[in-house]
Image (spheres, helix red, strand yellow):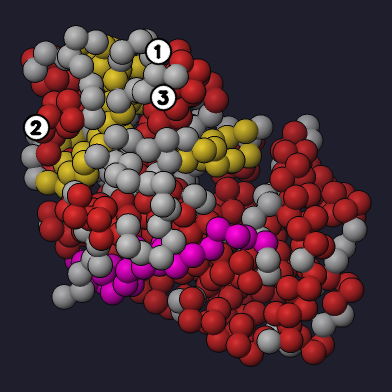
Amino acid sequence: MTNLPYDPADGEQFWEAIRKLPGYPSHETIPIKRMLFESGALFKTTDVLKLAGASQSKPLVVVMDETPMRRGAEDLKPFALAMLRREGWQIQVCALKADESGQVHTDMARIRQVKESLTAGCAVLSIGSGVATDIAKHGSFLRQEESGEKIPFVVYQTANSVSAYTSNMSPTFVDGVKRTLHSRYPDALICDLETLRDAPYEMTAGGVGDMLAVFVSFPDWYLAHRLGMDSTYSELAKNLIGPLGSLFLEHAQGIRSGDLASVSMLAKIIALGGLAMSLSDATTPMSGFEHVMSHALDLQAEVRRKPLAVHGSQVALAALAGAEMYRDFLANFDPLSLNVDACYPSAASMKSLVEASFAEIDPSGKAGAECWSDYILKLEQWRAHRKEFEDLLANWSWARNRLTAETCPPETIRQILLAVGAPVRWSELRPPVREREARFAFMNASLMRKRLTLGDLLIFTHWDRPSLWDRIWKIDG
């Protein structure tokens, strides 16, 4: 049986062990005081709140949306609120209402709603999945920045869905485009295994998919580092997360059946994913081309005010596309046939490309302008680090072997998704993603942000991306 190399349930022993890993930030001690992964953890909420510094003489602001959730026979949210009131907490509910798409999105309006609900001495408890967590997290962060007062913040995780729960960042819509904002850690995390077991299974399958991002994000991160365009690279995230493929395959049946040991294992893996980003001070360990492609899909839905598919399942299919992209490039790239000068387009030509591309879905030009404001930073770096690109070309055999070691065959990703009962085709998402939407995301994802991925290298080297996409869609569409 494969074990986690580091168990976040081990408290101070966990932090003491990972502090010795290369790349661990010297200024961090124990940023999250307690992480519970237990049966019946719901009933320890009061103890965890007090450990985080919450006072029962002050308001406890509970941030949650209106989505009903079950825990066994109970309606979770009213049950939890009633329990907390009986135990002496002064509850103030900050209810996040859905927009016309029928969903709540992480945007500045919702974040301001939370921020404005906070008062001196209060504490915050979020009860929800990733969106509610990110909104509560960043609202608390902005209030702290404004007031200078530390706000106790506890996350009650309601689904094994995304890695937001332990991260100090908040992916937020800005002019329709997802941007990752620096935020804060929670003071504590509560993973009640019965709650996680009884969450909608599509959320659980999405949590597996979200973590499969590493099979594209790790090589993307190394590639950007090798090209001189990311100084944050370290082995910390990879060492922290451990043998992900083996763990998922061993626990696939338990995850599907709701076995509490496997539910706990998935919750711990997801927690480690959030910490991998936070301790690396970058989303890059868990967010490469696959997440940017997912953001491009979200942008299309956001502009049309349509509901988003489950984030992690969408990311998993984008990771399949990214894995196919790596396999094609690593097998067929020939540096000797490359015209290096042609790999450096002018800013004017790329600005026209970015603006024209995003005008297809947002004729107002706001999305294109927001994307260009980030993309120009990457383009300038790309030009400034030409020497590193030429060095990569000169040592391509070695670099190809290193990148190959970081990747995962798409067949393995597909095997894991099938084993846990997750979508393996775009048409299986809810709502389904159509070919033209997925094609747009694949072709234009790299034009959205400053982070370099293999997708950028395909653009700069004039790779035949349309033909590559056609092959990918034929397999996974």
Q: Which residues are magenta?
A: 229-253
The residue lying toward the viewer, choosing from 262 and 6, is: 6
Badge 1 element: helix
Q: Residue at x 37, y 34 (%)?
A: 133
> What residue is disc 2 on?
43
Of the residues shown, which amino acid type is indicated by label 2? Phe
Q: Is residue 238 magenta?
A: yes
> What residue is disc 1 on?
117
Principal SS element in the magenta part? helix
Q: Residue furthest front?
A: 26
Q: Mark 1: few, some, or many residues within 10 Å (few <14, many ≥20)? A: some
Residue 57 x %, y %: 19, 9
Q: Is residue 476 left or right of residue 207?
A: right
> What residue is disc 3 on?
140
Q: Residue at x 47, y 41 (%)?
A: 169
Q: Residue at x 77, y 66 (%)?
A: 385
Q: Where 338 sits versus 224, above or below? A: below
How far apart are the alpha carbons under marks 1 and 3? Answer: 10 Å
Q: Earlier in the sequence, mark 3 or mark 2?
A: 2
